[in-house]
Structures are given as structure tokens and as C-alpha cells.
Image: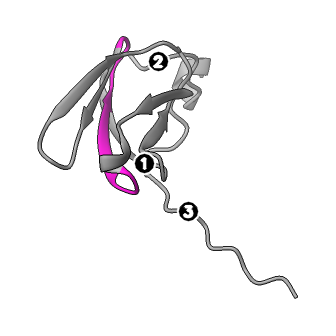
């Protein structure tokens, strides 16, 4: 079996695909090692990002789509946007 058939990704995918990202308190998402500022208006919202070789197309919750050029060639590590973990109380 060739390395690319084993599910190992070495760089951006050749076919566009979608993943989710959750904006931070300041409205920033991180996709494929690239930080994108959406603005405080979008903080704590989960957005859908279409990742291609050269661009990130971010579908905002208000219906707009923001297209940004990719500055990294890192693979996407997480497909689902995660909500922040709740810390347990320390006594």
C-alpha cells in the first residue's frame, strides 16, 4: 500500500472539503494552522469552512461567505469545531 493510500496527508488536500471551526472570545478561528480574524461579532459561533489547496471559504452565520488565501500548507487536523472544555474545580 502506498503512503497516500494509508490516510496520511502531507500538505493541503487536492479536493476541497468542509470542516467546522468555533470562533474564540475575540472572534478568531484556527484552520490548518492559520489564524483568521472574523471579528467580535462572530465570537463563540461555529462556522463552516471549505478548505481547498489555495483558499479558505468561511460561511458566516449571517449568510455571507469570506474567502481568504491560504498561507500554510498544513493539513486540517480536526473536522468538527470543539466547544471549550469546562475545567473541574480544584480543591
What segment is highlighted magenta in the picture? 43-54
Dot 3 surroundings within 10 Å: few (below 14), some, or many (20 or more)?
Answer: few
Give the secondary structure at mark 2.
loop
Give the secondary structure at mark 1.
loop
Q: Give the mark, 2 or 1, whose residue is nearer the N terminus.
A: 2
Q: Give the mark, 3 or 1, whose residue is nearer the N terminus.
A: 1
Quadrant holding the C terminus: bottom right
Residue shown at the point (44%, 52%) measured from the top left: 81
Residue 47 drawn at (x, y percent): 31, 46
Residue shown at the point (56%, 27%) measured from the top left: 33
Where is mark 3, residue-wise?
84
Q: Residue furthest bottom?
A: 91
Colouring style: one colour
Where is mark 2, residue-wise?
12
Where is mark 1, residue-wise?
23
Residue shown at the point (76%, 84%) measured from the top left: 89
Marks 3 and 1 sit apart, C-alpha to C-alpha, by 10 Å
Residue 40 drawn at (x, y percent): 37, 46
Q: Say above or below: 81 vs 52.
A: below
Give residue 13's quadrant in the image.
top left
- Of circles 2 and 1, the one toward us is 1
Q: Say above or below: 10 vs 47.
A: above
- Confirm or deny contact between disc 2 and disc 3 (CB under 8 A): no
Q: Going by the image, does 25 lie left or right of 55?
A: right
Residue shown at the point (14%, 47%) measured from the top left: 62
- Confirm or deny contact between disc 2 and disc 1 (CB under 8 A): no
Residue 45 among those drawn in magenta: yes
Amino acid at each position: 500500500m502506498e503512503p497516500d493510500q494509508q490516510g496520511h496527508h502531507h500538505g493541503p488536500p487536492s479536493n476541497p472539503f468542509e470542516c467546522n471551526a468555533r470562533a474564540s472570545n475575540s472572534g478568531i478561528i484556527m484552520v490548518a494552522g492559520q489564524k483568521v480574524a472574523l471579528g467580535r461579532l462572530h465570537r463563540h459561533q461555529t462556522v463552516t469552512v471549505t478548505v481547498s489547496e489555495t483558499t479558505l471559504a468561511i460561511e458566516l452565520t449571517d449568510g455571507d461567505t469570506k474567502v481568504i488565501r491560504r498561507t500554510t500548507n498544513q493539513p486540517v487536523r480536526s473536522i468538527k469545531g470543539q466547544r471549550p472544555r469546562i475545567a473541574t474545580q480544584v480543591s
